[in-house]
């Protein structure tokens, strides 16, 4: 709450949805943070504190249907709409950091002219197909059900899931990057980070242990790694 209360909150509109953007002003490079599914803007609170202390100008999106939003439903492409709306208002960002689905949203935003110098993804899935397969495995649904879900996504959004997946976009754009993932992540397997690294030649892979999917955002060594990576070369 103290981090949230220290920010300037902007109520933003994509044309389809309303969302919040939190800003911690400073004179340094601009950093955009995008949380994951079920997350919120200040889930990055320790990262935000350290970045701001170092002089970075920090922005963190709180997506529709997350945090205090009154919206009930959303999807990944609405996260991308939010990133595009923020960029239209505040200009290009020097760096972008995404957690979980937020990392995938950042990569999809590259298709809409987001062009940070460096990208950090934390606990991010390698592909939409992997997310669907993991979900179906957890609820004991068959591969046939997984394939039908994929078909439904592609038909509903007029897209091929591969074209919107993190690994495909990482391979196509290959920005300077860092992939952080924990071996004990129960939401997204660390194997997905290794698969992403194989498709993203210009990225460093940082594997942690014992932090899971969310505590990794609060670990000081992880934060130090991120801040050490961000400065422009």
Image: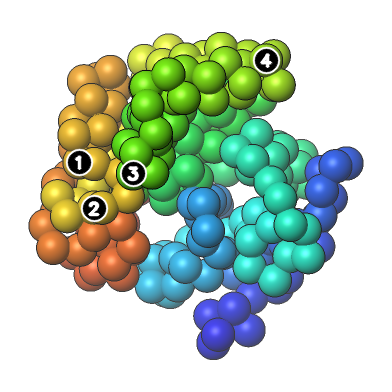
45 relative position to 140: left or right: right
Quadrant, the N terminus? bottom right
Q: Identify the mark at residue 157; answer none if there is no mark.
A: none
- Inter-mark Cα distance, 3 to 1: 16 Å
Name which residue lies at 54% across and 87% down.
2
Q: Is residue 125 above or below residue 97?
A: above
From this viewpoint, is residue 126 visible? yes
Question: Which residue does the numbered mark 3 point to in the structure image?
Answer: 138
- Inter-mark Cα distance, 2 to 1: 7 Å
Question: Which residue does the numbered mark 4 point to in the structure image?
Answer: 155
- Mark toward the start of the polypeptide (4 vs 1): 4
Q: Nearer the viewer, mark 3 or mark 1?
A: 3
Question: Which residue does the numbered mark 2 point to in the structure image?
Answer: 185
Whether label 2 touches label 1, CB < 8 Å:
yes
- Mark toward the start of the polypeptide (4 vs 3): 3
From this viewpoint, is residue 169 visible? no
Where is residue 209 drawn, in percent x and y?
11, 57
Where is residue 151 drawn, in percent x and y?
57, 16
The way the protein has been coloured in the rendering is rainbow
- Inter-mark Cα distance, 4 to 3: 24 Å
Residue at the bottom extreme, as displayed: 2
Q: Nearer the viewer, mark 4 or mark 2?
A: 4
Category of crowding for the residue at label 1, using alpha-carbon neighbours closer than 10 angstroms: few (below 14), some (14–19), many (at least 20): many
Question: Which residue does the numbered mark 1 point to in the structure image?
Answer: 190
Q: Is residue 230 above or below residue 8?
A: above
- Residue 222: image quadrant is bottom left
- Inter-mark Cα distance, 4 to 2: 31 Å
Whether label 4 touches label 3, CB < 8 Å:
no
Name which residue lies at 68% across and 46% down.
74
The answer to which of 27 and 24 lies nearer the viewer is 24
Name which residue lies at 34% across and 39% down.
140
- Inter-mark Cα distance, 4 to 1: 30 Å
């Amino acid at each position: 709450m103290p981090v949230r209360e220290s920010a300037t909150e902007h109520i933003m509109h994509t044309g389809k949805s309303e969302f919040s953007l939190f800003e911690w002003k400073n004179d340094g490079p601009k950093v955009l943070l995008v949380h994951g599914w079920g997350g919120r803007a200040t889930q990055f609170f320790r990262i935000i504190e350290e970045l701001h202390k170092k002089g970075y100008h920090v922005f963190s999106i709180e997506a529709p249907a997350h945090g205090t939003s009154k919206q009930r439903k959303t999807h990944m492409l609405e996260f991308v709409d939010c990133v595009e709306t923020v960029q239209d208002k505040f200009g290009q960002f020097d760096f972008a950091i995404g957690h979980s689905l937020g990392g995938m949203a950042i990569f999809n935003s590259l298709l809409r002219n987001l062009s940070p110098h460096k990208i950090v993804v934390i606990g991010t899935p390698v592909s939409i197909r992997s997310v669907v397969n993991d979900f179906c495995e957890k609820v004991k649904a068959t591969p046939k059900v997984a394939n039908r879900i994929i078909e439904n996504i592609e038909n509903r959004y007029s897209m091929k899931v591969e074209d919107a997946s993190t690994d495909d976009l990482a391979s196509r754009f290959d920005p300077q990057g860092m992939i952080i993932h924990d071996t004990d992540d129960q939401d997204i397997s660390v194997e997905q980070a290794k698969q992403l690294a194989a498709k993203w030649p210009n990225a460093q892979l940082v594997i942690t242990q014992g932090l899971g999917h969310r505590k990794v955002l609060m670990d000081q060594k992880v934060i130090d790694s991120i801040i050490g990576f961000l400065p422009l070369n």
